[in-house]
Amino acid sequence: MHGKILRYSISTGSGVVTNASKKIFELRKESWHDTRFLPVVGMFVEFRCDTNGYSITDAKASYYQEFPLNGIIKENDFWKTNTDEELKQKEQDTRNQMVQKIFKETNYFALKTIETTSSIQDCLKEYFAQEFNAIKFILDENDSSGTSKINYLLTKRFLLKAMDYLVFTDRNITMDTFANDLQRLNQLEYSYKNFTKNINLNIEKIYEDCFLESQYNYRGTIKAILGTKEKILQLNNKIKNSIYEIKQIKAKLENKKNDEKSLNIKLENIRFIIAKSEEEIKILNKTLENLTALTDGFKNQHLKIFEVVFKKFYEILVNKTKEAMDICATSLDDKIWKLGMSSTAIKNMFFKHDINDSYCTMTFLGQYLRRLDKNKLSENERVVYNYYFKYKQSHEKKFLIFTTNQKLEMSLKIQIMSISKNYSVVIVKKDGEFYSNINRQKFELGYIDPYIDIDTKQLIEEARNSKYNHDTKFSIVTKEQIAAIKD
């Protein structure tokens, strides 16, 4: 039957579904059999129950998740039916009624052209409705210009690792926090894999299903062709039967005992019927020839255009799906970063290992890459390796912290990396380390502990004379700020 998810928890793998009668059903993750979608609150579903009528044994997302105002299927239709097949049949019946209406209102004997009912672009949008709506929502809701998007396909493993570690470490955060993000990513990834897997597409089959099925004028003309052929067949059968009757009448006329006058009248009537039928067949054949030429011309003409538009549309759809995946992954990564940087558990567990990058996907990826033997990288590892360092070069901003005070180091580090996930810090504890770093790389800002046993003015002067940090500002932390740091 049809229903809607009212509550679902990824953490517990359980939830509830309601149907049109507002009856409640229990949904468990073992009963969810849909690789395209993850169960989330608000999703329309198709499901079956066991004999007790309460526990769901099989559930999947309904094909119908949105009900546009100008759409054939309304939400009310969803609740009145039990399966998507019923809705698809209703949709098909409605389309057939539209074709029938056009068929009745059109004079096919005088038809000169077949007009399109829907444009190729509109047909493609409807054909790829689920995929198109998913990316449209994401691209409309997210302004990705100027943001540092991560590549989902290359970083997926580490994005999920960052999320899992956060949930495992901080008991106040559950997987349900990320349910909607995971659902969107799962749907987009499923679409993208299908796009890239289906290389040898049958364009003509898609053309018929996608475009011709939506051309009601064309389908009305096809219906007229079938009706004309049927009428011609009936007339030919009528002529055959009439010829047989003529033979019988002639046989009776040879027998002088029959009423010749009435037989001759009947003979003339039959000959008139034959002549009239033959005349009708000529008109119908001419009409049939015209309608066939129109439909063949319509089909061939639009097929050429469809092939060009489809390839372009398909290419854009694949690219936009990839872009939407990256946007979703970046949004999820941002959420993980914000939660991670504000988490006391992460501060105490994660950053105690001298990690000087913010809590995000790229940090987990960097840790993984640093453990690899650079001379034995596989092809895929090399691609990820190059991507990581290119990303870092483009987006990373570094901050220098000179201190031997562990509390100050941690406090400044968390503050800095909570501003942006692309901010990282370099910790130095000796003047030699300070000089080495300022002469090797650019820093956005430097922080110096006032308690270090080194002339701070000399340090800043050396930095101003360096190649990379001559315009970098250095801030000496006040003693009051240090005293205010909480454990």
Image (spheres, rainbow, N blue to C red):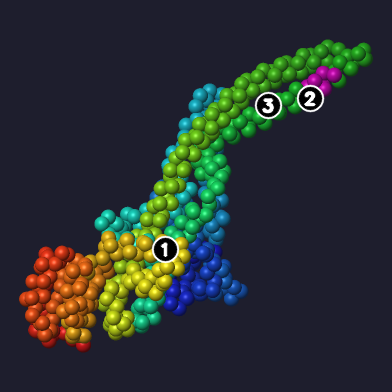
290 over 363 or under it: above or below: above
Sequence order check, earlier mark of 1 and 3: 3
Give me the C-alpha separation between circle 1 and circle 3: 70 Å
Q: Position of residue 144 (x, y in %)?
A: 29, 57
Q: Amino acid at mark 2?
A: Asn
Q: Is residue 280 visible?
A: no
Disc 1 designates what residue? 382
Sequence order check, earlier mark of 3 and 2: 3
440 over 130 or under it: above or below: below
- Identify the residue shown where x is 18% and y is 81%: 430
Q: How many marks?
A: 3
Q: Position of residue 160 (x, y in %)?
A: 40, 71
- Identify the residue shown where x is 34% and y is 69%: 362
- Identify the residue shown where x is 27% and y is 69%: 421
Disc sitting over residue 232 in the figure: 3
Q: Position of residue 230 (x, y in %)?
A: 67, 31
Q: Is residue 239 visible?
A: yes
- Range of residues picked out in magenta: 240-247
